Image (spheres, rainbow, N blue to C red):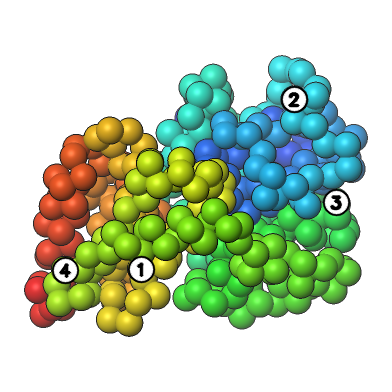
Amino acid sequence: MAKGKQATVDDAAALLRRAESVLILCHQKPDGDTLGSGLALRLALCALGKQVRIACPDGFPERYAFLYPEGFAPEKQPEFDPELVVAVDVADPKLLGAVGVQWEGKIGLCIDHHPSNTRYAEWLLLDPDAASTTQIMAKVLPQMGVPLTREIALPLYTGLATDTGCFRYSNVTPAALRLGADLIETGIDSFMVNKRMFETKSRGRVELEQLVLGTLEYHYGGQFAIAVIASADAERTGVPEADMDGIPALPRQIEGVEIAATLKQKGPEQFRVSMRGSARFNVSEICGRLGGGGHPRAAGCTLNGTLAAVKSRLVEVVAPDFERLGNG
């Protein structure tokens, strides 16, 4: 199977219309964008009378339960051999975990907005200028002949809101704001979505944030901050992986910090690095040097080694970026 052929919105819509059975794949550590894209597409395909199943390697978090249609039970979805496998908001098949292994080489379409997409699918609908994958999906669904209903608008809005930080991030464009208005006009409760996603935290989450902020250390005159989510702290507070969204952004909010790296411990000597940067730095390029990728302002990678060694590696890898701007 040839990989990475560039698809247009019309191409993607045609592929989806032709297939009578579709499997939708979301990435591990699911966020509002991958779930919003996948669930909106599921609703659209169901409206066209298709057989549809949606899969996520880490399951479907309770935090996003308001998006799941009435009666939706992931474990009771229909079993079938799909004509088309679609990955949504998945830049690399490694992000599909065991699900990706099962469908390796069989993904016919990927719809994504990550510039670091590895072009692993047969067809790729990629728009790196889109604020979220749901912004792309909002163009595909009408071309499939599916109207924008309130039910479909809810997951689309959730993905758009979460990937733009409630329309605060630098990826917000006039097109993103116009789409947000169009989705709200369908009658969705945007206040509820925003409150759940941005203003509601469990006590455990607040306690974990306190512990993470207690690990902060600074480099390059306070311009580079490193924080750690230790396994013991995550276990002690009882915060599930799905409820840790937003924690990597905390160090970047500190005045003077240009790049922030939050290390989530995955094993005794393995750390998932989530990096956030200001407009002067491309953290996708920085993470790319470490085998990862993402967006210019938000990216990630996985590093092996002791905590001290991983921190040292990060301090070393960002050195050229600060030196380039005379901030070393």
Q: Closer to the N terminus: mark 3 or mark 2?
A: 2
Q: Closer to the N terminus: mark 1 or mark 2?
A: 2
Residue 247 in picture, x, y percent from top left? 45, 60
Q: Nearer the viewer, mark 1 or mark 3?
A: 1
For residue 251, the mark is: 1
Find numbered disc 1 in the image and state the secondary structure of the residue it sits on: helix
Residue 205 in picture, x, y percent from top left? 53, 56
Residue 106 in picture, x, y percent from top left? 56, 24
Name which residue type carries label 2. Glu
**How much space separates mark 1 and mark 4, taking CA atoms?**
13 Å
Q: Closer to the N terminus: mark 3 or mark 4?
A: 3
**How much space separates mark 2 and mark 4, taking CA atoms?**
47 Å
For residue 145, the mark is: 3
The residue under the point 65% across, 58% down is: 159
| Left or right for 23, reference 228 | right
Q: Closer to the N terminus: mark 1 or mark 4?
A: 4
* Quadrant where the C terminus is found in the figure: bottom left
For residue 75, the mark is: 2
Name which residue type carries label 1. Pro
Question: Dot 4 corresponds to which residue?
Answer: 219
Q: Residues within 10 Å of mark 4 (few under 14, many from 20)?
A: some
**Residue 315 is at least partly visible in this image:** yes
195 vs 117: above or below: below
| Left or right for 201, reference 91 | right
The residue under the point 69% across, 63% down is: 196
Q: Are marks 3 and 2 in contact (CB under 8 Å)?
A: no
**How much space separates mark 1 and mark 3, taking CA atoms?**
44 Å
The residue under the point 61% across, 72% down is: 166
